[in-house]
Image: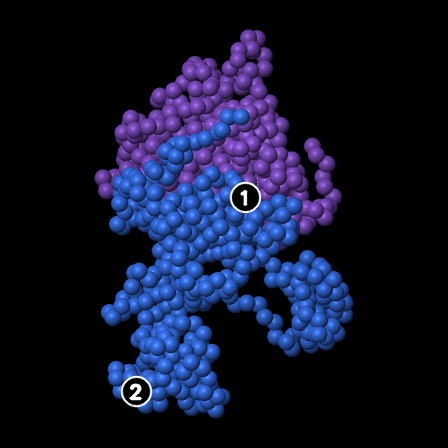
Chain colours: A purple, B blue
Amino acid sequence: MSPVLDALTEDHAAVYDRQLRVWGVEVQRRLIEAKVLIIGLGGLAAEIAKNIVLAGVGTVALVDDTAASSVAPGNFLVELDSATGKSVAEASAVTLQAMNPLIAVRVERGPPSASALLLPDGLQPEGGAADQVSASPVLTAAEDLRSLVSRYDTVVACGLPLREVAALDDLCRQLSKQLFAGEVRGASSFAFVDLGPRHVYTVQGDPEEKVVEYRSFRDAMKTDLKAVNKRTHPLYLALRACWEFEEAHCRSAGGPADVAEVQDVAQRLASAVPAGNTAAAMKALIPEALVEGFVLDGAAVAPGGASDLVQEAAQPLGELAPVCAVVGGVVANNVLRAVSHFNPPLRNLFCYSYLVRDGLGVEECF
Amino acid sequence: MEDIQMDDEERWRDLDLLLTRPGQLVGPGFEPCPELRAFLQSPDCRVLCVGAGGLGCEILKDLALSGVVHIDVIDMDTIDVSNLNRQFLFRMKDVGQPKATVAAERINARVPGVQVIPHFSRIEDQPAEWYRSFAIIILGLDSLEARRYMNSVVCGFLEYDENGQPDLATVKPMVDGGTEGFKGHARVILPGHTPCFECTLWLFPPQTKFPLCTLAETPRSPAHCIEYAHLILWGQVRTGEEFDTDNEEHMKWVYERAAERAKQYGIHGVTFQLTQGVVKNIIPAIASTNAIISAQCVLEALKTLTCFSTGLDNYMMYVGSTGLYTHTAKYEKDPSCPVCSAGVPMEVDPDSTLQQFIDQLRSDAALGKHLSAPSVSYGAINLFAHGVFEAETAPNLTRRMADLVPDDGAVLTVNDKRLRGPMRVRARYSSSMKA
């Protein structure tokens, strides 16, 4: 544990002046003590990283060994001219560290994914994985990721396939770490927050601690559809449809060939919702164009095989800069709340699409 | 050393998905075609970003990454260390440099192909015609006065046709963003269609001004003590010296006098930080709110330029302090707005006097029959009023019109006992109207 700072230095006070006037010295101190791990550095993650680095989170670690030459176009942190030979994480770290020399930006080795946690069919992750005799590469990679996560308080993972989000979420819950996951796919985007079964926080002017329970990503994807009504953001059903597709096919939905199937699943889900009992109601619940866009504008489908091929094909190409900035701002605000335990963080799903309801950003709990 | 290049198609794939596909959720009149991106990246599509601070840095980034090429940025300020917590284009070594210049340099260096031109100047120092050359103007300002100025310039371009409809060719779209702490707003202004700033001036909270008697006789809060030292004591003790908020010795002097006064009255809470906040009118600010609001503004600008989605109609507020709340309101234009409403057009010689203008009204073929003894006002200001204020406003009658009403195209309100309601006249200055 890093030593508690007795007082902010003069440098901190000068640079952070405008934000100290927003959240105060105590919150700033907690931010300085926080350690956040960011897995994957596409456009959305770059925005989140920028915001939490500027806010003064004390340790920000980046994981993305993709070659900088293949960086997602939306990651504005990478300076292509000086990035030859560097990984995306290394190149991004240079810019982030320059943005705020008062904190520590680190690079950790590893791919921008949690696929190591996905075991072959039939194998379930056991609690006592440490006593597996044969150290297969998959299990070693899983152990590496587990060890990496254990050294931080909070994990931010953007653009991962939904099965990987679930697996990473399971790991975080096991290790009592906070998780923020999300993705921007063209006009639509979502962010998911899991702060564990018992998140404690306080509110301005009230010394009494409050406790709130977060559910897992798996639960959110499988919860009773009775919770869905006319006011639920349609992206929730789109997300669930993509989840079901992934469970059935062990790969992400992507590309025109998958659209029809995802739309079928979405329709089936909508019809199971009490409010979706008419064709018109179903259409209102989940506009076709939304699902189509969500499937097409996401990351390209990984063909499977050696890791180099995966990296080349799976670039998130559907990230629109301003959408990344909006979601990046919302996620960053909530990371700051989560690590400082001040004010109730988002619970637990944020959906935003400027194609829906005049771009209303909706926070819902599943 | 291998040159890392990305081909155009790959680089703008996400933008092309938006601009070359039809859809059910697009804006009215949307025609998907590759020409749309070509237009966005052409010299015909110049975008102006007013301000290179908290909002400006984010706006420039989002515009450049969204494919806009020809961007101008204007800002009269230099970089301060307190900017660094959110104005991410700047570094410690840039402190003291002009914001516009450094911001443009950074964006030009990072985004291949973009051409950001900086203007280190006050917005008032650019001729109105310069603003007309932009396809859209995005505001990242931090004061009401600056917004009102930009509003009057942009609405000044607006012309109405004989049917009282806005001439679309003269409608200059403007997007405005503002933030404070966790709160912010984004709005779209289409002069003649949506309300302009003046129409909705009541949206802005009243500026905190303490009564002088409170400051002088009965202070109760630390802010009272600070403003006493700043507004009253400084003038009395350091006569002739102009107070400079950037001068540390001046600020320290005010802080010490304020602390003395607070002690005298048993008031707690005067700190140097608060003194700075009160005297400089500091707005608390964080990076994330600026990111969100700027992004919303750029999205609206892109929609206005290409119609790929229906635009915000017309005001979005955002509150992110304890949860997440946004609300979109469709505010209505004020039909009698002194800045953007139609009014009867009249050509006026700028050198003519107010008396001559009134004579012109009375002798006008269409308007004169409604008038016997008209009073004229400009917004809330009485230029000449019969009755109670006659003596007070009489001196204005011999003053030059252009001095009394500097804005060309301003709407003047004419009242007369013969009229049923106020008559609005849009005065367009023209030297050919020599009396």
Mark 2 surroundings: few (<14), some (14-19) or many (≥20) residues within 10 A: few
* Residue at screen point 35% across, 28% down: A254
> Which amino acid is tagged 2?
Ser
Chain of the residue that carries numbered disc 1 in the rendered image = B
Chain of the residue that carries numbered disc 2 in the rendered image = B
For the residues bearing labels 2 and 1, Cβ distance under 8 angstroms: no
Residue B367's spot in the image, x, y percent?
28, 83
Residue B86's spot in the image, x, y percent?
57, 48
**Left or right placement of residue B277 versus residue A69 in this view:** right
Q: Name the residue under label 2.
A: B363
Q: How far apart are marks 2 and 1 (CA)?
A: 59 Å
* Observer-nearest of A296 and A84: A84
Residue B339's spot in the image, x, y percent?
39, 70
> Which amino acid is tagged 1?
Arg
* Residue at screen point 35% across, 65% down: B158
Note whether residue B15 is visible. yes
* Residue at screen point 45% across, 49% down: B71
Q: In which quarter of the image is the C terminus of chain B?
A: bottom left
**Left or right placement of residue B20 versus residue B203 in this view:** left
Is label 2 on the same chain as label 1?
yes
Q: Mark 1 points at which residue?
A: B106
B108 to B208, vertically: above or below: above
- Mark positioned earlier in the residue sequence (2 or 1): 1
Q: What element carries label 2?
A: helix
A28 to B420, vertically: above or below: above
**Left or right placement of residue A145 versus residue B414 in this view:** right
* Observer-nearest of A132 and A18: A18
